[in-house]
Image: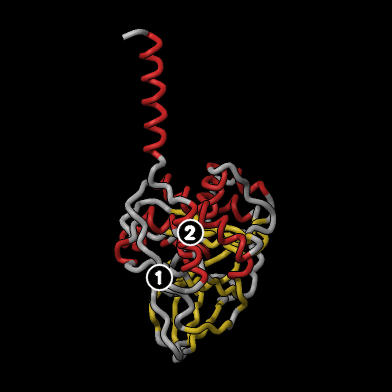
Amino acid sequence: MTRPFLRCLAAFTLAASAAVSHATCPGDVETAVLVARYMSLQPADNPPPMSIGDAECGRDKMVRFMEQQLGLRAGYKAGLTNPAVQKRFKHDAPVRGVLFSAMLLPDGAQFPAKFGARPLFEADLMVRVKDEGVHDAKTPAEVLQHLEAIIPLIELPDLIVRDPSRLDGPGVASINVGARWAVMGAEIKPTPAMEAQLARMVVKVLDGDGRELDRGQGSDVLGHPLNAVIWLAQDVARGGGRLKRGDLLSLGSFSKLMPPKPGLWVKVVYEGLEGTPEVGVSFRE
């Protein structure tokens, strides 16, 4: 074989390998269908097995299509930050989704129980970024210095697909981590004392009669909830972005994912966090 032929063969092999590595990134038509199903509250086909890189490619395409329907982005959500949730989805690392302003509603919001194709609710927590210095934070104490607010949160995700039991970590990432709605409580001004409080707090999910539906501890989220902020800052930077003042960050689940039912009223209480904050939501037919 001649050297020019070998060079051409090598170039062809590299190009083919690159094409194969991205072969499972969802196409535009496939993504448009997914978003159409999302907007109409109808279940979509399960994604095929894919790498986390291809899943992130699909997520970014989905977000661009969603932006045409939902408008302004509000921030990000970290999913699979709880070991129990990681076990359910067979993935040992967090995944990132995008939040839109249209998804965010105030304390006491009421929803139809069928608010999505595969609706669920969970106890969460949100923070608002004060400045880009959060990218330099390496510890929860340092993160606190770059936050404007800590916000009680009930997240109402939607796993969208026909068979959520078949979703794995990349599958969750590819559907924008199921972002649908989030109900926000009153904002809390961060204080240095909250570093310890956030790790030790007990997060309880109660029904309208005060019965406990589930509970978790602050340390259930990556050892400390603010470690999710560190992970999000690093992951956003890895994708070429930066967190900025005003960005809202959903940190992950302190409870199991639970299905809503008509007539159910849910309250999440953060015992051990200054002021014992809470946030509530109710579901109707």
Q: Residue at x 53, y 66 (%)?
A: 125
Q: Which mark is residue 30?
A: none
Determine which residue is flagged by label 2: 176
Q: Of 266 and 269, which appears nearest the observer? A: 266
Q: Position of residue 111 (x, y in %)?
A: 52, 82
Query: Does the CB distance between marks 1 and 2 fall below 8 Å?
Result: no
Q: Quadrant of residue 9?
A: top left
Q: Position of residue 7 (x, y in %)?
A: 40, 15
Q: Which mark is residue 43?
A: 1
Quadrant in the picture for the N terminus: top left
Q: Is residue 107 visible?
A: yes
Q: Residue at x 38, y 38 (%)?
A: 21
Report helix, strand or loop for mark 2.
helix
In this rendering, the answer to whether 64 lies above or below 24 is below
Q: Of 96 and 56, which appears nearest the observer? A: 56
Count neighbours of disc 1 (C-alpha within 10 A) and say few if under 14, some if 14 to 19, many if 20 or more: some
Q: Is residue 227 visible?
A: no
Count neighbours of disc 2 (C-alpha within 10 A) and say few if under 14, some if 14 to 19, many if 20 or more: many
Q: Nearer the viewer, mark 1 or mark 2?
A: 1
Which amino acid is tagged 2?
Asn
Q: Residue at x 41, y 33 (%)?
A: 18
Q: Position of residue 118 (x, y in %)?
A: 40, 73
Which amino acid is tagged 1?
Pro
Indicate the colouring scheme: secondary structure
Q: Residue at x 44, y 88 (%)?
A: 262
Q: Position of residue 225 (x, y in %)?
A: 50, 59
Work out which residue is located at the far top of the displayed protein and give it: 2
Report helix, strand or loop for mark 1.
loop
Label whose residue precedes the other's in the sequence (1 or 2): 1
